[in-house]
Image (cartoon, rainbow, N blue to C red):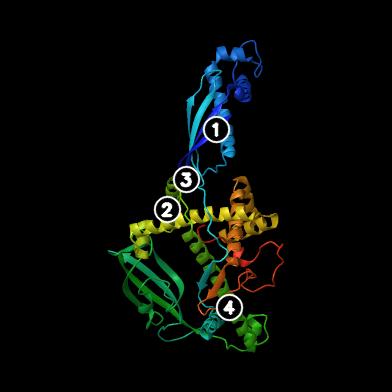
Amino acid sequence: MKSAVETLNPTRAKLTIEVPFEELKPSLDAAYQRIAKQVNVPGFRKGKVPPAVIDRQVGRGAVLDEAINDALPKLYVQALQENDLQPLAQPEIDITKFDDNETLEFTAEVDVRPTIDVPAYDDLAVQVDDLTVTDDDVTEQVENLRERFATLNEVDRAAQDGDVVTIDLVASSDGETVEGGEVNGYSYKVGAGDMLDGVDDALRGLSSGEEATFVSQLLGGDLAGQDVDVVVKVSSVKEQELPAFDDEFAQTASEFDTADELREDVRTRLERGKRLEQAAAARDAVLEKLLDAAEIPLPEAAITAEIAERKGEIEQQLMYQGMTMEQYLDGQEQTVDEFEAELEKRVRDAMAAQFLLDEVAKAEELGVDQSELSQHLFRRAQQSGQNPDEFVKHMVEHNHIPEMVAEVVRGKALALIVEGAKVTDASGNHVELKNLLPDGSIGEPRAEAEPETDAVAEEEPADA
């Protein structure tokens, strides 16, 4: 077999392949065997029909077609390997010449991974926000914890912010109750702001047994975004009584003996969360800087297909929520053009990041061991809310393991780049990332030969 490649553009190639007829003999023999098992010829058992008889009964042309269908995929893959091409989609194959006992010639056009010159990444410098945890941040978390242990006492007065009220609510349009617009015995914290617009204003000042009417807009359903009349009636008003934040509370709500120890633990947890946010910001900033410095051509057909797929997924999710794309965009205060431009940018950035990180991983000879793959699969299962065993089974059955391996490798490539970059906060302080652990704490420096399991390698950049 001889093959030649013509570069049509940086992301599309045309292979021209010539195959001597004798190289088709294995596929031709296999074609005769398959057809022999399918035809009934008097005097011959199934599977034992000679080729000459098959040629007379079925036709030599049908056998040749069968042989070519068997051979083409293998020949195409062989040509890709010979020319070091990595396809991104299914090829467009055209048989340009073939006669019985003559050379087979065909072409295959396909989108391929572009050749990329990776910019230097050993001297990158980026800046992230300062890690700041204020006393107010700590107090807010402490108050949230106290609310979890609060008691509710029914009171004989009008509702005010912070009270928990039991309500009945009915939304109607033109005097008809809206489908799905009625709730009974619902418990709601006044001032929470997570129900219909206007409900908090209507509830303030209402006592048990009183009701109020207001106009609002439903968030979903056929009338989403339209004005409806809402009647809300209060059946009880309860006041939250928060426990004192003292040593006794600390012992009840946590494993700590004193309130000071609990408060300090809250601060530590907040600091760790902020540190992880810094790491994520550093990953994004480093990758963005590297992408800006690289020229990465992208296959337009693949971009178009990915955009359509993502848009379809979004529309399906909205449908499950009872919303249309128009309603969603109205809520986001975004036009269709703005949405599509943002989606296209995300797709382009993600594909460019994949190409770039794959090249880095190849240059650095990064691999994946079984423990790293297992950890990644477990995290992905948790993120999707699935049972880990069922998730892994699905990945194996649908041949998604190579994709999971690629995700791990790209994460390691990005971690290597980020750890080699100079990352400082807005105040000019060095931001430690190399030994950052998944819980946001700083671990002991690891030996060079140890696998990267720190938080920087935990995930790929968004959409990568």
Residue 311 disc label? 2
Residue type at tag 1: Ser
Tell me the SS state at disc 2: helix
Q: Is label 3 or label 2 in front?
A: 3
Q: Is label 4 or label 2 in front?
A: 4
Please give the residue where the numbered disc 3 appears in the rendered image: 11
Rendered location of residue 299, percent (x, y): 45, 47
Task: Compare marks 4 and 3 and give the one earlier in the sequence.
Answer: 3
Q: Is label 1 or label 3 in front?
A: 1
Q: Is label 1 or label 4 in front?
A: 1
Can residue 441 be seen by looking at this rendering?
A: yes
Residue 271 disc label? 4
Mark 1 and mark 2: Cα distance apart in space: 39 Å
Indicate whether 6 appears above or below 223. Answer: above
Q: Is label 4 or label 3 in front?
A: 3
Taking depth in this image into account, of 266 and 72 the one nearest to the observer is 72
Please give the residue where the numbered disc 1 appears in the rendered image: 3
| Quarter of the image that includes the N terminus | top right
Q: Is label 1 or label 2 in front?
A: 1
Mark 4 and mark 2: Cα distance apart in space: 37 Å
Task: Compare marks 1 and 4 and give the one earlier in the sequence.
Answer: 1
